[in-house]
Image (tube, helix red, strand yellow):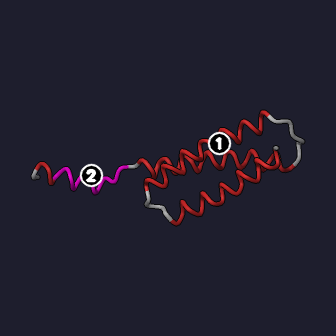
Amino acid sequence: MFNVVFWILAIWFIVNVIWMWFRFNDQKLQKTFAWINCLAIVIGFWVYYGVTHDANSLANWFICLNWANVILAIIQFYFGYRHNNAGHTAGHTAVHGN
């Protein structure tokens, strides 16, 4: 189970990064992938700490992958929930007539 989950998470990470890179300004996609990535993070840490595994090199890569997913999710949440200040300011001045 440990190896299977590792490879599933590794493939998800690669697909996630590729889609994030090519659809960088799509906030809806960034939010969706960030929340899916949170689920992958929970599963990843649960499997790493909850399932018995050998202390081999795959275990080291597994924990690195989990932390890389944490960083990626933070970046995706930032770009998914950020506000475009230029558009927000332009709309604000148009409403108030400044």
Give the residue displayed 56% in from the left and 62% down from the top.
Answer: 19
Residue identified by numbered label 2: 88
Tell me the element at label 1.
Answer: helix
The residue sitting at 67% across, 45% down in the picture is 67
Q: Quick check: is 63 in the magenta stretch?
A: no
Where's residue 23, x and y in %? 49, 63
Q: Is residue 18 above or below residue 55?
A: below
Give the residue displayed 45% in from the left and 50% down from the top. Answer: 80
Instruction: Give yes or no for contact between labels 1 and 2 (Cβ–Cβ under 8 Å).
Output: no
Query: Which amino acid type corresponds to the residue marked 2 in the rendered image?
Result: His
Left or right position of 25 against 38: left
Residue 53: x and y in percent read 87, 40
Residue 59, image x, y percentages: 82, 45
User: Which residue is labeled 1 in the image?
Assistant: 41
Q: Is residue 51 left or right of residue 30?
A: right
Q: Identify which residue, 52 or 62, lies in the foreground.
A: 52
Q: Which residues are magenta?
A: 83-93
Q: Position of residue 4 (x, y in %)?
A: 80, 49
> Residue 44, located in which quarter of the rendered image?
top right
As drawn, the residue found furthest toward the left would be: 97
Q: Amino acid at mark 1?
A: Ile
